Each structure stands twice: as structure tokens, then as C-alpha cells.
Image (cartoon, rainbow, N blue to C red):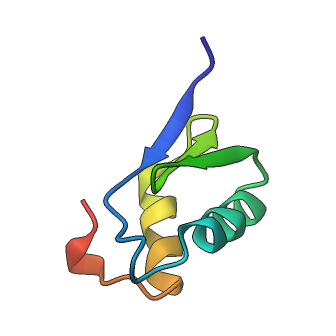
Amino acid sequence: GKIITVIEGIDKAKIDVKDVSKKLKSKFACGGTVKDSVIELQGDHNIAKIKEELVKLGFNRDTIE
């Protein structure tokens, strides 16, 4: 029944999904987990802020929906 924010589509062969999850959880001060290369962050987070943080972590802005 809790709200989560899901980040999916990360290629776990090229990127350490757990490391990305750790950095996002720290940045947004929330809990979360990784399940089958899908990051689940606890809470309803602003999508624009998550996109900006992913760009800072090296993701291409054009590949983020």
C-alpha cells in the first residue's frame, strides 16, 4: 500500500544498478531496493529531479523517459 518510484530499463551488464540505487537513495533521503535491475525508491519523487540526478550520474538525457 505504500507509494514507490520505479526506475527501470538500466542495462545491468554495463552499469552497476546497486551503485546507482545507493546514490539515488542517498540523494533523495529515502529507502529502496533493487529487483531484477529495477530500482524501487520509497516515496513519490519528482520525476524531473530524478532525471537530473541520473544525468549527473552519466546517463544520456535523451535515453531517459
Q: Nearer the viewer, residue 65 or 11?
A: 11
Residue 17, image x, y percentages: 54, 68
The answer to which image quadrant residue 63 occupies is: bottom left
User: Would you place residue 43 above or below residue 60 in this image?
Assistant: above
Residue 6, image x, y percentages: 45, 43
User: How many numbered discs?
Assistant: 0
> Residue at the location (55% across, 76% down)?
16
Residue 5, image x, y percentages: 51, 40
Q: Give the position of the C terminus as an image quadrant.
A: bottom left
> Residue at the location (71% across, 65% down)?
22
24 sits to left or right of 37:
right
User: Would you place residue 4 above or below residue 28 in this image?
Assistant: above
> Residue at the location (53% across, 73% down)?
53
Farthest residue to the left: give it: 62
60 sits to left or right of 26:
left
User: Would you place residue 20 above or below residue 35 in this image?
Assistant: below
29 sits to left or right of 18:
right
The answer to which image quadrant residue 32 occupies is: top right
Farthest residue to the top: give it: 1
Q: Give the position of the N terminus as an image quadrant.
A: top right
Residue 26, image x, y percentages: 77, 64
